[in-house]
Image (cartoon, rainbow, N blue to C red):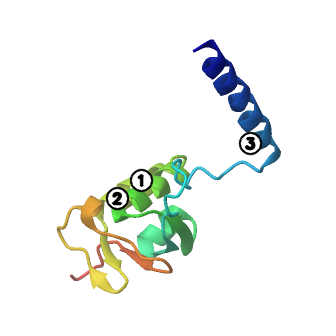
Amino acid sequence: METARHRQATEGVAVATTDTARPARPATLPAQPGTPEPPSGTIRYWAAAKAAAGTAEEPYAARTLADALAAARRRHEDEPEYARVLARCSFLVDGGPVGTRDHSTVQLAEGGTVEVLPPFAGG
């Protein structure tokens, strides 16, 4: 038993030493080895959403629309208008309307596009 613990502790040190030599993984990558990376794509902002975000588009790395929007909210947490505008927006994912579907059920694809559309005057 003592030998097994000693071996595990020694192996743990060797792994830690090896890991520190590698570059750190970005936070968007999965923690589990062998788990595929989340898809990446583009979030495009229109009209008031574009003004609130301060950009026309930005990348996402997320499996669902809910995850992509949560990450975007964190990126723009210093812009209070962003969250207010985003709450009123509708979304298209790869050209299809999300409508009233739960954002956690809307899967994102590699190379996909999320369009963020604020309410427009007249409709």
Closer to the camera in the image, 55 or 101: 101
Residue at which label 1 appears: 70
Residue at which label 3 appears: 19
- Left or right, 91 with reference to 102: right
Amino acid beneath label 2: Ala
- Left or right, 77 with reference to 26: left
- Residue 101, numbered circle: none
Q: CA distance from mark 2 to mark 3?
A: 31 Å
Depth check, mark 1 against mark 3: the one in front is 3
Closer to the camera in the image, 76 or 61: 61
- Residue 66, numbered circle: 2
Q: Residue furthest top?
A: 2
Q: CA distance from mark 1 to mark 2?
A: 6 Å
Q: Residue furthest right?
A: 21
Report which quarter residue 28 is drawn in. Answer: bottom right
| Vertical comparison of 121 with 8: above or below | below
Report which quarter residue 10 is drawn in. Answer: top right
* Residues at discs 1 and 2 in contact (Cβ within 8 Å): yes
| Vertical comparison of 79 with 68: above or below | above
> The residue tagged with tag 3: helix, strand or loop?
helix
**Residue 58, position as x, y percentages in the image:** 56, 70
Residue drawn at x 28%, y 59% is: 104
Dot 1 or dot 3: first in sequence order is: 3
Depth check, mark 2 against mark 3: the one in front is 3
Amino acid beneath label 3: Asp
- Left or right, 120 with reference to 20: left
> The residue tagged with tag 1: helix, strand or loop?
helix
Closer to the camera in the image, 107 or 98: 107
Q: CA distance from mark 1 to mark 3?
A: 29 Å
| Vertical comparison of 17 with 94: above or below | above
| Residue 46 at least partly seen | no
